Image (cartoon, grey):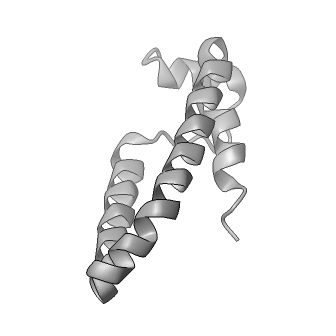
Amino acid sequence: TWGPVPWVYQAEVFPRRVRVKGSAVSSLSNYLNNWILTFLGPYLMTHWKKYTFFLFAVCCFIAWAYSQFYVIESKGLNLEKKDAKMSGKA
């Protein structure tokens, strides 16, 4: 399951100086989006029927494209190298 991946990734992706604030914003975004979808999901299923899933597919495609082009690969990097790479100094 992919459930815990965002929690681990957010702890690794932010530079040390903003890690706590970045993790807080990420967590808030996660919970806020879950809350919105709790109410929006049934409405969409009632009115859009099967096309609701096309909306989710488009969102997944946008997230994939963003991660391919803008998220830095952090495999094999220690914290100092990640910080330098993300700040543009590497």
Q: For residue 58, what is the image quadrant?
A: bottom left
Q: Can you give x and y, in whole percent of width and height, for residue 23 in the image?
A: 64, 30
Quadrant for the N terminus, please. Answer: bottom right
Q: Nearer the viewer, residue 54 or 41?
A: 41
Query: Which residue is at 66% across, 65% downward?
Result: 2
Q: Can you give x and y, in whole percent of width and height, for residue 13 in the image?
A: 60, 34
Q: Is residue 49 left or right of residue 83?
A: left
Query: Which residue is at 58% across, 25% downward?
Result: 22
Q: Is residue 54 above or below residue 39?
A: below
Q: Nearer the viewer, residue 72 or 45?
A: 45
**Would residue 64 be visible to someone looking at this image?**
yes
Q: Is residue 22 above or below residue 71?
A: above
Q: Is residue 42 left or right of residue 44?
A: right
Q: Is residue 84 above or below residue 76?
A: above
Q: Can you give x and y, in whole percent of width and height, for residue 33 in the image?
A: 49, 50
View extreme (top): residue: 17
Q: Nearer the viewer, residue 56 or 89?
A: 56
Q: For residue 41, what is the image quadrant?
A: bottom left
Query: Which residue is at 39% across, 53% downward?
Result: 68
Q: Can you give x and y, in whole percent of width and height, for residue 53 in the image?
A: 36, 79
View extreme (bottom): residue: 50
Q: Is residue 84 above or below residue 64?
A: above
Query: Which residue is at 65% across, 22% downward?
Result: 19
Q: Is residue 19 left or right of residue 26?
A: right
